[in-house]
Image (spheres, helix red, strand yellow):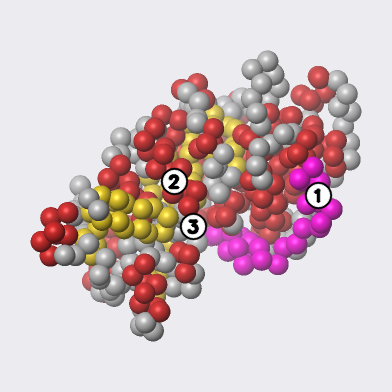
Amino acid sequence: MASVLGSCSTAATVAPRHLSSRTSRTSIPSLSICPGKSFGRKFYGGIGVHGKKRSQFQVTNVATEISPSEQAQRVAAKENQRPVYPFAAIVGQDEMKLCLLLNVIDPKIGGVMIMGDRGTGKSTTVRSLVDLLPEIKVVSGDPYNSDPEDPESMGVEVRESIVKGEQLPVIKTKINMVDLPLGATEDRVCGTIDIEKALTEGVKAFEPGLLAKANRGILYVDEVNLLDDHLVDVLLDSAASGWNTVEREGISISHPARFILIGSGNPEEGELRPQLLDRFGMHAQVGTVRDAELRVKIVEERARFDKNPKEFRVSYEAEQEKLQEQIGSARSYLPSVQIDQDLKVKISKVCAELNVDGLRGDIVTNRAAKALAALKGSDKVSPEDIATVIPNCLRHRLRKDPLESIDSGLLVMEKFYEVFS
């Protein structure tokens, strides 16, 4: 772990700031973990510097074994699919990358909302996360990616089979990333019931939707602020309960829908409903790179990828594997990470003094700080870990003041220094 994170042994200290004047807010710099090193260099190996037919699923049918021929077809399809830009090749945007990595380490953080200028690599970065996603155990053939060990993440049929003592085949598969198109219909998102089959054969034939596919995975909505209201309502309901229920013609079918919600958008194109915004665990702001050398670097890397995607991906294989190992180590290390009671009280004091509604801000900040400590290989959360993640956890939860011109992230940091000093 130490070799991945770098040899620096001294953590950054939270320097006291003079915050008496309004102008002092703009002087708060971004924190780095090692003195003299950029945040991107610390965590990302230095890259911060330089028409398929749908099958119906019958509720009475339990999971089936995947044949070797079907597995071979999946491998071939994966090799032939459109190449994805490597996560390790993303230049800059360290705040966005850190938020995404922390959610992969601890999915209970609750997702990320990424807002920023157009053309800043938001969608590219999110989709590049696919290569780094770890493997999870699922019941083979189950359309809901049921966890064989967690009843809360099991479909009803799988749970009934386990209660009966049946042995279900278990396989390891990568966490799914599901794209939710803006033009998707509600039936395609929630799933639909075959009424004709239900009436003629007496069988609840259910065709799972995108929420079923996203269970225990990632649901990504690009331009989320343009999403239709009725789909926003569906997402709110599933995100709140962790289950999706389809009600139609007196027939009711429920299945687990616990997913990491990732959204991206441009604030100029419209605001997001506060109810949905609060469901995102973290909020990352992305700006256009102003440094001329970095802009040239981004253009050259993109040109290399467009010219020969396979060769470009091979050149970043070592860094990608290193990141995968780092994420795997952090996930296994996470349960042992502790946070002092004094730090918990100070986190809640910051939330209370900022008038943050509810307790989601407190919970998410604690989880994100632990995930960051696990990423660094530490078994204890430090104030520096909290300082790094607390703006992203609370920025979008503050009540908006139309007369306030200061960025909400700076307001959070100002209050943080006041409480923690």
Q: Could you tell which of marks 2 and 1 lies nearer the N-terminus?
A: 2
**Residue type indicated by callout 2:** Asp
Residue 335 within the segment the image draws in magenta: yes
Relative to 407, say whether 198 is above or below: below
Q: Which callout, 3 or 1, points at the residue further toward the start of the chain?
A: 3
Residue in the foreground of this view, choosing between 267 and 363: 363
- Expressed as whole percent of the image width and height from the top left, the position of residue 417 reads 83, 37
For marks 3 and 1, give the CA distance: 33 Å
Using the image, tell me which numbered label, if any, was put on residue 345: 1
Using the image as rendered, state which of residue 203 and residue 61 is in the foreground: 203
Q: Is residue 109 visible?
A: yes
Residue 283 point in image, percent of width and height: 59, 38
Relative vertical location of residue 163 with respect to residue 368 in this rendering, above or below = below
**Disc 2 from disc 3: Cα separation:** 26 Å
Q: Secondary structure at mark 1?
A: helix
* In front: label 3 or label 1: 1
SS under mark 2: helix
